[in-house]
């Protein structure tokens, strides 16, 4: 298939393009320079593609000053609006039949256990961005394009994301839980993330909202213990909440709080996770990293 992707050079995009390329798909990477060309330029790139995947978005783990907030929001809202406009402009016969667009589990509150049917959303900055991000897709619902909205959890891979930042600290024996450690930790192994995208492409009955998290319900303390054991290093330290607030300000909520999320829709559709729990996910990733060294 011909697959067009935004965000293909980012942390998730690099893994996904490598995975889909190995499967033999013809990939079209939509660059930032293409987005500057507006809907007409994007329409030319996605014309006759079978699938459009939108992973564009600036990293959220950074201090949320006014400039960074604008970057976080615009990299999602503006890009998605451009893609939607470009899709709608195309004649029916030239449109991709599937649009997979990213969102995040940060839309949910930190109190409830959330399936895709949950409407218990938070009202912080990140949740507000997610709600606006998803609202951009409303025009697609009026077309013949199959829409899969993927709410992505914490993606585990050693070369980026949270795990990429923490592994060096744990190997130096200065890792530890964050605050109480009781905050939910809803994750997905990067390989399962790629497999989910492949599954959604291959199964035409799949559409709507999908939580991209493993079915294991864990917390930050569980994650800390398993990572420390796998690294063979102690994790005596606790990162106090006030320290994170001093460093990251308002953005500290992304580490201090968490969401309990369950992938009910994926499971109902028949998807089987290769790494359904923290232990299997972390052990596989760390085993891979040892082979690399």
Image (spheres, rainbow, N blue to C red):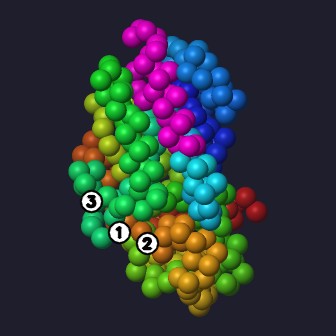
- Res. 110 mark: 1
- Res. 257 mark: 2
The image shows residue 182, relative to residue 25, as above or below, that is below
Residue 182 appears at what percent x and percent y? 40, 80
Q: Which mark is first along the chain, 1 or 2?
A: 1
Disc 1/disc 3 C-alpha distance (Å): 9 Å
Q: Secondary structure at mark 3?
A: loop
The image shows residue 46, relative to residue 102, as above or below, that is above
Task: Specify start and end residues of the magenta stretch as a single range.
Answer: 74-99
Most distant residue in the front direction = 66
Residue 155 appears at what percent x and percent y? 52, 57
The image shows residue 190, relative to residue 226, as above or below, that is above
Q: Quadrant of residue 127?
A: bottom left
Residue 146 appears at what percent x and percent y? 34, 27
The C terminus appears in which quarter of the rendering?
bottom right
Residue at screen point 35% across, 27% down: 139
């Amino acid at each position: 298939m011909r697959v067009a992707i935004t965000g293909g050079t980012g942390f998730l995009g690099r893994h996904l393009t490598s995975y889909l390329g190995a499967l033999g798909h013809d990939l079209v990477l939509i660059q930032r320079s293409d987005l500057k060309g507006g809907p007409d330029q994007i329409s030319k790139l996605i014309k006759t593609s079978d699938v459009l995947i939108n992973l564009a978005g600036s990293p959220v783990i950074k201090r949320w000053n006014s400039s960074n907030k604008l970057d976080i929001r615009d990299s999602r809202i503006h890009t998605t609006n451009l893609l939607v406009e470009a899709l709608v402009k195309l004649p029916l016969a030239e449109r991709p039949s599937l649009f997979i667009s990213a969102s995040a589990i940060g839309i949910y509150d930190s109190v409830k256990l959330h399936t895709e049917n949950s409407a218990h959303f938070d009202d912080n900055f990140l949740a507000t961005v997610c709600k606006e991000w998803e609202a951009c897709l409303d025009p697609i619902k009026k077309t013949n394009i199959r829409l899969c909205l993927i709410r992505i959890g914490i993606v585990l891979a050693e070369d980026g994301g949270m795990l990429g930042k923490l592994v060096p600290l744990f190997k130096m024996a200065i890792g530890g839980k964050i605050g109480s450690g009781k905050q939910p930790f809803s994750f997905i192994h990067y390989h399962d993330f790629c497999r989910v995208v492949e599954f959604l492409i291959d199964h035409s009955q799949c559409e709507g909202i999908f939580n991209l998290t493993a079915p294991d319900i864990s917390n930050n303390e569980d994650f800390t213990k398993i990572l420390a054991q796998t690294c063979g290093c102690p994790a005596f330290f606790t990162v106090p909440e006030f320290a994170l607030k001093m460093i990251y300000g308002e953005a500290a909520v992304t580490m201090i709080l968490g969401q309990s999320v369950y992938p009910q829709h994926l499971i109902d559709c028949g998807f089987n996770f290769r790494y359904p729990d923290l232990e299997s996910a972390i052990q596989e990733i760390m085993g891979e990293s040892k082979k690399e060294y």
